[in-house]
Image (spheres, rainbow, N blue to C red):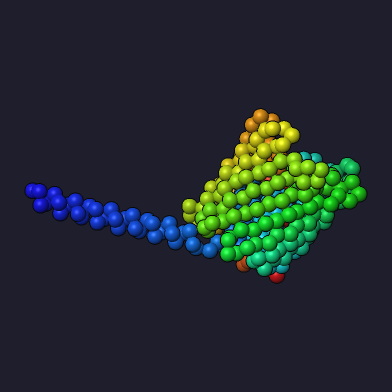
Amino acid sequence: LALGSRVCSYKFSFFTFVIIVTQGSRLALAAQVPVSESHHLVSGGGGVSAPSYVTATGENPAGLAYNERLRILAHGSISTIPDLSTLAAGGGIYWGNGWIAGGVEFVGSTAQPTGFTIDTGLAFAIPPIRTSFGASYGVPLSGGAAAQNNLLAHQLDLGILISPIQMIAVGGTLYDAIGGFEGAGFGVTVRPLRFFDLTADASYGFSTGGFTLKPGVGLHLAFFHATFGYGLDLNGGGHGIVNGITAGVGFDIAHRVQITSYYRQQNELYVGLQLSL
């Protein structure tokens, strides 16, 4: 009986070891599998740790480094539904090669007072340490404060993204450097599965002394991407992250044409069309 128990114990230990090794191998494999560029088609959470490679100028500008090609972008948005008098429209060009990227957008608004804004951004990556840095600046022209293509108008933002392994991304931002920083953001995105993200972003307002916490989830399939988040204000709210419910969807057609749409992430309602060359 003692011998039989010892044999059973050895068998149990062996199978437990096999299960642990197998699961560990899968985890290690998930951590090293490269994430495609299209995985960053739509932003998640508050855009701090999971920004989009196009809308990063209004989120975490370090996300511009995800660009790996030339893109032409056209978009339209509404800041108040269903008031079409708050329509904004624009277009831009983005380019990247995997280690340096930049972009410029021209945005015009029909809101009163009408105006124009030029949004620019630049980012560079250091592949050996899996880190990227970025900066974005919105230049208002002719009353262009009304033309910002974002619910939270920023002037000069700084950002950093660190991805120690493929399944984890850590982001940090400093918002509105002109005249003194107005806020800061921090977030973590974990990718337990290659097609699924869990994001937890937060921002702090230096003037309000409050926080905005924003968890989110993301689904990334071959041609379809979707994100959902909910921002919660604490003690007056933070700076740089939209509160309440936000959502985004994106369609990647043969890696050449991308269609994106957001609800309250970029503006009250946003639709964009991208052509990748």
**Looking at the picture, how far across and down is residue 116, in whole percent?**
86, 51
Residue that protrudes farthest toward the top in the picture: 235
Q: Residue at x 65, y 53 (%)?
A: 160
Task: Give the quarter of the image for residue 202.
Answer: top right
Q: Residue at x 73, y 54 (%)?
A: 135
Q: Is residue 262 visible?
A: no
> Looking at this view, is 156 or 36 the one in front?
156
Q: Residue at x 77, y 40 (%)?
A: 80
Relative side of 53 to 76, left or right = left
Residue that protrudes farthest toward the right in the picture: 142
**Looking at the picture, how far across and down is residue 4, in whole percent?**
11, 51
- The mark tally for this picture is 0
Q: Residue at x 62, y 45 (%)?
A: 186
Q: Determine whether 112 is above or below 10 in the image.
A: above
Q: Is residue 120 visible?
A: yes
> Looking at this view, is 168 or 242 the one in front?
168
Relative side of 114 to 236, left or right = right
Q: Determine whether 81 is above or below 10 in the image.
A: above
Q: Determine whether 176 is above or below 166 in the image.
A: above
The quarter of the picture where the C terminus appears is bottom right
**Looking at the picture, how far across and down is residue 17, in whole percent?**
29, 55
> Looking at this view, is 277 or 120 the one in front?
120
Task: Give the quarter of the image for residue 26.
Answer: bottom left
Task: Give the quarter of the image for residue 61.
Answer: bottom right
Residue that protrudes farthest toward the left in the picture: 1
